[in-house]
Image (cartoon, rainbow, N blue to C red):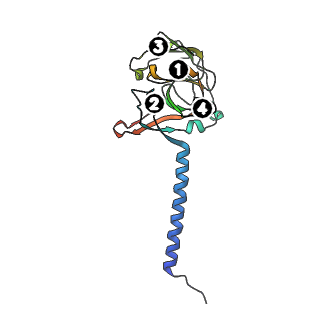
Amino acid sequence: MTTQVPLKSTTIRRVVRELIESVIMAIALYAIISTVVARYQILNISMEPNFHEGQLVVVDRLDSLLPAWLYGVAHAEGNSTGASSMQKRGQVVVFYPTAVHEGIPLIKRVIGVPGDLLEITDGQVRVNQEWLEEPYINGLATGCSQYCSLVLQPGQYFVMGDNRPNSFDSRSFGPIDDENIIGHVVLRYWPLDRLEFFP
């Protein structure tokens, strides 16, 4: 004689199983998204007028997660088109200024990429013997007392804030290594009236 499981009991088991599967999928999806992107609040004025204190941004971390052998490094010395590297000139990146990844991450704009010959002179930036057009600084002069002329080595980036007179950046601490870069900004999502996507 066989015992039949009541229909109600079977339905409850199915619903519980589907609920557990949904929760597991949601946790897995959240973990994947958290690995690929990160959210940051801007806490300084070094990127004004383009990014302001209190604004919230989303950072694409995928570039920093990929191993170097996957994309390689091309040098750009003597070539005004720039290097074929993961971070591109003009992108805004979030990074740790020290190799030990201590302290609060900084947000700056990539000015020089691996292989670039970079010079800061007469209040302007020259990359690979050509003056760099920088509409994002709204005509501000770029002063420099350290790290004013250098060739970037493989895996090195030169970063500066858009608010040049009020930015602690590569002019002070030198180039940053690619392993210190968390990722580049892809979205400003707060405040809503300043919502903007970035390449």
Decide which of tag 3 and tag 1 comes sooner along the chain.
Answer: 1
* Labelled disc at residue 180: 4
Quadrant in which residue 70 is drawn: top right
Along the horizontal axis of the image, is 73 left or right of 164? right
- In the picture as drawn, the residue positioned furthest to the top comes out as 122
Which tag is nearer the camera, tag 1 or tag 2? Answer: 2
Element marked by disc 4: helix
Query: Furthest-right residue in view?
Result: 69
User: Disc number at residue 16?
Assistant: none
| Alpha carbons under labels 4 and 2: distance apart | 19 Å
Foreground disc of the pair 1, 4? 4
Amino acid type of the residue tagged 2 in the rendering: Asn
> Is there CB contact under 8 Å for labels 3 and 1?
no
**Contact? badges 4 and 2 (CB < 8 Å):** no
The answer to whether mark 1 and mark 4 are in CB contact below 8 A is no
Q: Would you name the residue on which mark 2 appears?
A: 44
In percent of the image, x 51 and y 78: which residue is there?
9
In what element is the residue under mark 1?
loop
Are the residues flagged by discs 1 and 2 in contact, CB closer than 8 Å? Answer: no
Q: What amino acid does circle 4 point to?
A: Asn
Q: Is residue 52 above or below residue 145?
A: below
Residue beneath the point at 40% across and 28% down: 50
Where is residue 143 shown, x and y percent of the image? 48, 14
Packing grade of label 3 (10 A; few <14, some 14-19, many >=20) is some
